[in-house]
Image (spheres, rainbow, N blue to C red):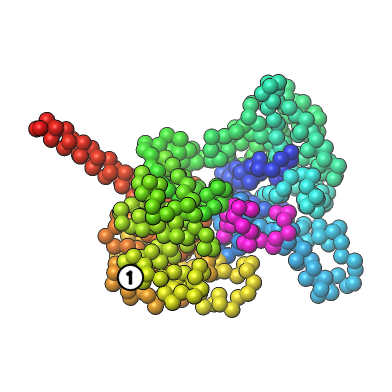
């Protein structure tokens, strides 16, 4: 029988439930258990696809085209396995399903209520992944904080499941905060006590407490927490602030979080977790041999979570290259031809990020032109590729009015235009080109050599595409469509000839980069940044030596 672990949060948001859930899943996976993670979000949006990145960070896309919470990215990066539509559920999706059933007459005229109708649907979704015993353990992260009014139906659903399944099949891990008061030089347990008390008022008690803290929890303090929160002392887990999220699984292994959970679920411990590859990655991450600076050109740079998968992809690629990647955020809205040199001249590479809408577009185009003309390694993702095509059309092909019809619907030089199948769509949510699609690569291309194959599959999230009416003009000028979808002819990848590294992709490679399998395009991009830096340093050294020699001669 599949076992269920629920991860809840208390005291405050942003404590890292997703990282704790992913770390626990990684340890259980390393012990030989088949494990998956799902996220239940309490907001009423049907999915995060229509949410502004400033509101909720990036929207993560799964293989099957689901627009999901960014925590699913953590799940995939840690477990190195795909998630799906079933791994992310929102309150909006729950209510939408129940209301649809009510309209169809499925409830036979009964009064539809939160209990039992909403909670029954929540329970059905919570156990869906466990059907057929495909997984030994299903971990469910509950969004929000205990005490939030919108989280109450989820807490009630877990309470019911725990009553129905029994403690040996259903476990609650509660993530909480033990603040350190510097003035008093004390760790305070009262917020955690109140959080557990609030949960218990709704009939649910945690089995394990994971305590976020800035200072180590001493034995007597753990005993006090256990006593007042009604958990065993060995189930009080210390979660010290970490230097990187990727050290958390090893910290949780040291604290025996996985062992405690298995004991409470009456499961065998399995074999000792093999974390050797994880430790190797961490060593490379912590002790790099070199450093590069990459400019991230975007319009949501104030919020790091807006580009979470890209930043993690650069971390993975940096470790693979034994190189520290310093990301310099550059707001495209404030980038102009006049200040481009000042803002971009000391970068080793430039990445132009995805996005929607017209704000900051000209700044992205200016950054792309600078990278093309100065031979700086360039990587454009989704909108980044599209704007690379616009820049090339304007400044090389002579189409001075070239643009995307997304930003300028009236342009008669729309080198980027809306996909045909998108033109009749009126609803926004979940209607873009989403999920994994096949791409065929030219065998003689740089990208094919990077992937080591000519057939790839990558995830998409877009409505607009390269206008194939301009294909011949681009090819003749040296901007090559080296990757295309075999069914639609959609251009997926653009490469520029006679440039150290200039690749634009219509898809989102960042979604498939993991700790154990860094994405090859990110790895190649960071490698190109290293090589560009070395060439610049060698040139500077040669010029210096030449100046010394000339000075002596004079």
Tell me the magenta residue range: 41-61
Position of residue 244 relative to residue 335, above or below, is above
Position of residue 44 relative to residue 468, above or below, is above
Q: Quadrant of the C terminus?
A: top left
Can the viewer see residue 443?
no
Q: Nearer the viewer, residue 486 or 267?
A: 486
Residue 180 lies left or right of residue 398; in this view the side is right
* Residue furthest out toward the right: 110
Res. 115 image quadrant: bottom right
Residue 109 at x, y percent in the picture = 90, 72
Residue 47 lies in the magenta stretch: yes
Residue 68 at x, y percent in the picture = 62, 58
* Residue furthest out toward the front: 338
Q: Nearer the viewer, residue 169 or 526?
A: 526
Please give the name of the residue rendered at 80% of the width and 53% of the height, measured from the top-left corner. 153
Residue 222 lies left or right of residue 106; in this view the side is left
Residue 16 at x, y percent in the picture = 64, 42
Kindly identify which residue carries mark 1.
398
Please give the name of the residue rendered at 68% of the width and 21% of the height, measured from the top-left corner. 183
Please give the name of the residue rendered at 82% of the width and 40% of the height, measured from the top-left corner. 198
Residue 394 at x, y percent in the picture = 36, 67
Can the viewer see residue 89?
yes
Residue 394 lies left or right of residue 122; in this view the side is left
Residue 214 lies in the magenta stretch: no
Q: Nearer the viewer, residue 283 or 41?
A: 41
Residue 478 lies left or right of residue 92; in this view the side is left
Element marked by disc 1 = loop
Q: Residues within 10 Å of mark 1 (few under 14, many from 20)?
A: few
Res. 19 image quadrant: top right
Q: Nearer the viewer, residue 280 or 33?
A: 280
Position of residue 549 relative to residue 23, above or below, is above
User: Disc count in the image?
Assistant: 1
């Amino acid at each position: 029988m599949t076992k269920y672990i629920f991860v809840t949060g208390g005291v405050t948001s942003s404590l890292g439930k997703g990282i704790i859930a992913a770390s626990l899943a990684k340890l259980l996976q390393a012990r030989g258990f088949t494990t998956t993670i799902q996220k239940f979000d309490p907001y009423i949006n049907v999915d995060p696809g229509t949410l502004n990145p400033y509101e909720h960070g990036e929207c993560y896309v799964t293989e099957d085209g689901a627009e999901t919470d960014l925590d699913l990215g953590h799940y995939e990066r840690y477990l190195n396995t795909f998630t799906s539509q079933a791994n992310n559920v929102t309150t909006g999706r729950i209510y939408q399903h129940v209301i649809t059933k009510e309209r169809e007459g499925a409830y036979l005229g009964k009064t539809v209520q939160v209990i039992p109708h909403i909670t029954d649907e929540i329970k059905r979704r919570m156990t869906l992944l466990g059907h057929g015993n495909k997984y030994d353990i299903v971990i469910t992260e509950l969004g929000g904080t205990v005490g939030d009014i919108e989280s109450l139906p989820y807490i009630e659903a877990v309470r019911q499941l725990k009553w129905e399944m029994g403690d040996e099949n259903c476990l609650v891990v509660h993530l909480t905060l033990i603040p350190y008061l510097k003035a008093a030089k004390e760790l305070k347990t009262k917020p955690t006590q109140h959080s557990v008390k609030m949960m218990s008022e709704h009939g649910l008690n945690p089995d394990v407490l994971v305590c976020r803290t800035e200072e180590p929890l001493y034995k007597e303090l753990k005993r006090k927490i256990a006593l007042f929160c009604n958990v065993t002392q060995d189930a009080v887990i210390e979660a010290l602030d970490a230097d990187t999220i990727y050290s958390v699984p090893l910290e949780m292994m040291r604290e025996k979080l996985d062992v405690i959970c298995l004991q409470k679920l009456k499961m065998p411990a399995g074999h000792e977790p093999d974390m050797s590859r994880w430790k190797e990655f961490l060593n490379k991450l912590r002790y790099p041999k070199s450093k590069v600076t990459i400019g991230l050109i975007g319009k949501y740079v104030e919020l790091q979570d807006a580009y979470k998968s890209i930043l993690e992809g650069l971390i993975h690629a940096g470790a693979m290259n034994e190189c520290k990647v310093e990301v310099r955020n550059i707001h495209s809205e404030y980038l102009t031809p006049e200040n481009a040199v000042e803002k971009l001249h000391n970068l080793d590479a430039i990445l132009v990020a995805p996005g929607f809408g017209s704000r900051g577009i000209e700044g992205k185009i200016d950054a792309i032109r600078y990278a093309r003309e100065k031979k700086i390694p360039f990587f454009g993702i989704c909108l980044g590729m599209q704007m690379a095509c616009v820049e090339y059309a304007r400044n090389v092909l002579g189409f001075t009015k070239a643009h995307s019809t997304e930003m300028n619907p009236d342009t008669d030089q729309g080198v980027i235009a809306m996909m045909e199948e998108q033109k009749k769509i009126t609803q926004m949510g979940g209607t873009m080109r989403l999920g994994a699609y096949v791409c065929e690569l030219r065998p003689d291309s740089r990208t094919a050599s990077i992937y080591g194959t000519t057939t790839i599959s990558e995830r998409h999230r877009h409505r607009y595409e390269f206008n194939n009416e301009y294909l011949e003009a681009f090819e003749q000028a040296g901007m090559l469509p080296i990757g295309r979808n075999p069914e639609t002819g959609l251009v997926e990848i653009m490469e520029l000839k006679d440039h150290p590294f200039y690749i634009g992709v219509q898809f989102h490679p960042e979604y498939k980069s993991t700790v154990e399998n860094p994405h090859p395009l990110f790895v190649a991009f960071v490698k190109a940044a290293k090589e560009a830096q070395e060439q610049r340093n060698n040139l500077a050294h040669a010029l210096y030596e030449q100046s010394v020699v000339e000075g002596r001669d004079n």
